[in-house]
Amino acid sequence: MANKERVTFGSKIGVILATVGCAVGLGSIWRFPYMVGSNGGGAFLLVFMICTVLLGLPIMITEFFIGRHSRRNAAGAFKELAPGTQWSLIGYNGVLAAFLILGFYAVVSGWTLEYIWQAMTGSLSGKTTAEFTTDFETFSSSALRPIGWTIVFIALTHFIIVSGVEKGIERASKIMMPALFLILLILCIRSVTLPGVDEGLAFLFKPDFEKITSSVVLSAMGQTFFSLSIGMGCLITYSSYFGKDTNLQLTAIQVTVLNTFVALLAGIMVFPAVFSFGIEPTAGPELVFITLPNIFEQLPFGNIWSFIFFILLALAALTSTISLHEVATAYVHEEYHMTRKKAAWIVSIGVAIIGALSSLSFGLLKEYTIGGLILFDALDYLTAKIMMPIGGMMICIFVGLRIEKKVLKEELTNKGTITFYFFNTYAFFIKYIAPAAIGLIFLNELGLIKK
Ligand code: PFF
């Protein structure tokens, strides 16, 4: 592919929106509260924040460097910057991760469609907390309905990928994203005015240091990678379209701050309500889906609020599934020299199969586990806690070893036209500290570090 003449995003706001769209999604609104709840509350939040600042932000800047400097896709970027070497394996790891993530992410995206449907038909109201819980469990463990919604969501993503209407989505998210913030804020306000708010906020914000175990640290690191979409080349692909004058550092800071802000709002929305309604914080993937309807119940015109909220959540999920699909489709399209349409079909069919199986792992296939985890959880674990951190580690090592500091600095400062404060610290950090920290977190989880 002629790499110097690629199209670039039309506007600065387009760059930010597409990248924010890729990052902000179910990871912050569904996965973050569920991880906080299952990993000891405030202790998890603390480690997550540390990982976000010390690993998330520098790795995002590094991916932006690789993408814009090479102007290629996730695998091609490494071929361009280090021809004839095995570094492109990092890209393949990312492509595989994107494919597997989409396989379980589409299931949760499908759940959001079910909730839109329920809000429309009025069946999301007038129930007790226990009823919301059993109804969700009955739905998610049934065979056909959730698979149907999963396939609808994959079809929607497929349609956007092949018809190239991302521009429309981008434009729509200019309105939808702020709307999502706003509605999250309203739900937070409702949640913090419920009885029991203190317990919920203390659970979220007061770290109990005893709870910081190796697996909590691994989970928090995994959440950072998942939620920021780093370590798998998605941001390499997106930043390959950035313009020459895009401020890479600033964009990374904006995306990280916005994403973390959304996650915090989701936490503030969920936990007071969890304690107020007597829901188990450790409920797992269903946590948000059983908590939210309770909050809507407490609002006037609850059905309308829930309808709007789930539409926005589905859209936030869609901008992420598009980016995941794009990583896999672009790879199949470019690497196997087939049309984009055919490549997209292969990805969609593959993802639909994995999606169906992970949906069934809540019910029919519950007995089939991998390392004690049902398929849905196993895919989540493998991608967020193993593949993405390994990808991030390798990205740092790659830039540390193969890229001259001068070249790195030139790209990140737009040829010296903007300042990069603490550049040397950043360079030292990604070369030594970040890979070592990720490595230690792995060794610690494997029990190879003696206390
Ligand atoms: N960061 C997305 C979210 O939080 O929902 C999930 C995701 C999208 C992960 C794209 C990885 C990716 F490449």
Image: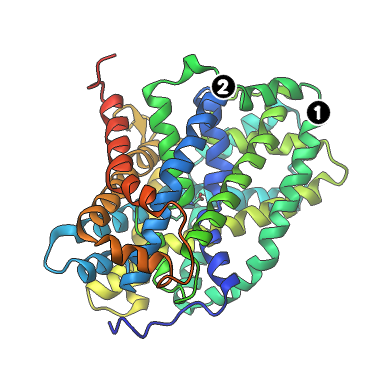
* Displayed quadrant of residue 84: bottom left
Name which of mark 1 and mark 2 comes first in the sequence.
Answer: 1
Give residue 269's position: percent from left, percent from top: 70, 37
How many badges with numbers are in the image?
2
* Looking at the image, residue 395 lies above or below residue 415: above
Residue in the foreground of this view, choosing between 127 and 217: 217
* Displayed quadrant of residue 169: bottom right
Q: Which residue is mark 1?
A: 194
Image position of 28 (left or right of 231)? right
Q: Which residue is mark 2?
A: 207
Quadrant (top left, top right, bottom left, bottom right) of the N terminus: bottom left
Image position of 58 (left or right of 387)? right
| Residue 348 seen | no
* Looking at the image, residue 255 lies above or below residue 56: below
Image position of 175 (left or right of 21)? right
Give residue 402's position: percent from left, percent from top: 20, 59
